[in-house]
Image: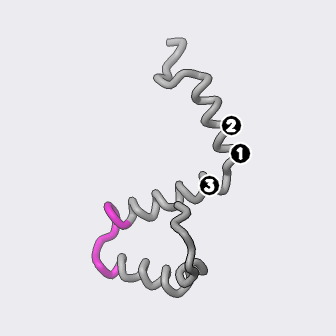
């Protein structure tokens, strides 16, 4: 098979260029997605969720900052 992709080549290339130009944003979105997936599908009990909450409160430098929602 010559073309096994459903997405056109020009779109795949444009997406790759965007990822290369926006590495920080891409890393943020991927990390957020991983955290959400863990909380939704992989956490075994409430202790896992509570531990994540404590880490967020104690170690996240953005927790106490008053910022806008910057996704």
Relative to 17, is 32 above or below?
Answer: below
**First in residue order: circle 3 vs circle 2:** 2
Q: Say whether marks 2 and 1 touch (CB < 8 Å).
A: yes
Decide whether the magenta segment is chiefly helix, strand or loop.
Answer: helix
Q: Residue at x 56, y 79 (%)?
A: 66
Dot 2 crowding, Cα within 10 Å, few <14, some 14–19, many 20+ = few
Q: Residue at x 59, y 29 (%)?
A: 12
Q: Which mark is residue 25?
A: 3
In the drawing, does residue 52 fall left or right of residue 69?
left
Does 43 appear in magenta?
A: yes
Tag 3 near tag 2, CB within 8 Å: no
* Alpha carbon distance from label 2 to label 1: 6 Å
Magenta part of the chain? 39-47
The answer to whether 52 appears left or right of 63 in the picture is left
Picture layout, residue 65 above or below residue 5: below
Q: Which mark is residue 33?
A: none
| Residue situated in front as seen by the camera: 22 or 54 | 22
Return the residue at label 1: 21
- SS assignment at label 3: helix
Q: Residues within 10 Å of mark 3 (few under 14, many from 20)?
A: few
46 in magenta:
yes
Q: Secondary structure at mark 1?
A: helix
Q: Looking at the image, do the residues carrying marks 3 and 1 touch, with CB atoms under 8 Å apart? A: no
Compared with residue 9, is residue 67 higher up or lower down, i.e. above or below? below
Count of numbered labels shown in the rendering: 3
């Amino acid at each position: 098979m010559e073309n096994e992709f459903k997405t056109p080549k020009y779109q795949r290339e444009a997406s790759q260029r965007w990822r290369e130009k926006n590495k920080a944003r891409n890393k943020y979105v991927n990390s957020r997605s991983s955290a959400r997936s863990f909380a939704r599908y992989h956490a075994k009990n409430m202790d896992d969720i509570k531990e994540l909450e404590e880490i967020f409160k104690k170690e996240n430098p953005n927790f106490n900052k008053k910022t806008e929602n910057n996704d």
